[in-house]
Image (cartoon, rainbow, N blue to C red):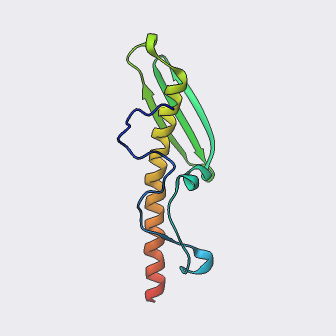
Amino acid sequence: MYQPFAHLTPRGKPYDLPPLPNNEKRGKTMEKLTYEHIQSVIKTADYLQHGVLTVCVLTLRNGFTVTGESACLSLATYDAEIGRKIAFDNAVDKIWQLEGYLAKQRMYEATQRSET
């Protein structure tokens, strides 16, 4: 498996984020933002290639689109599979940010409801 930055935490492990309240049980059960959750919000993945540039367009279940890109120095060393993987991973990183914001917003809203 290609891993360009071996020092980084491998994908698929939960990030050390504050737990999210589970709305069904009104905050009594907690969960973490996981790679499985990120995968579950992705509806489709489409790829575009232009020379050494690969673009991944992820369409989320709610219709929002997120893009990730990768580029190679030379067409002679370009590997389409690696380009797609890096572009996909870059797009997924953006989903982490969006889902992290949404999780924080849900936590904030839960504290506001409990204070009233």
Position of residue 76 measured from the top left corner of the image (x, y, whole percent): 45, 10
Q: Dividing the image into 4 quarters, which one contains the C terminus?
A: bottom left
Q: Quadrant of residue 115?
A: bottom left
Note whether 19 is above or below 28 in the view shown. Answer: above
Which residue is rendered at x = 40% and y = 32% of the image? 4
Q: Nearer the viewer, residue 103 or 1?
A: 1
Residue found at the very far left of the displayed protein: 7
Which residue is rendered at x = 49% and y = 53% of the image? 13
Asked whether, in this view, residue 60 is left or right of residue 8, the answer is right
Which residue is rendered at x = 43% and y = 57% of the image? 15
Q: Quadrant of residue 8?
A: top left
Q: Quadrant of residue 47?
A: top right
Position of residue 31 measured from the top left corner of the image (x, y, whole percent): 53, 68
Note whether 101 is above or below 25 in the view shown. Answer: above
Note whether 64 is above or below 101 in the view shown. Answer: above
Residue found at the very far bottom of the displayed protein: 116
Note whether 16 is above or below 96 in the view shown. Answer: below
Position of residue 70 measured from the top left corner of the image (x, y, whole percent): 44, 29
Q: Could you tell me how many numbered marks the image carries?
A: 0
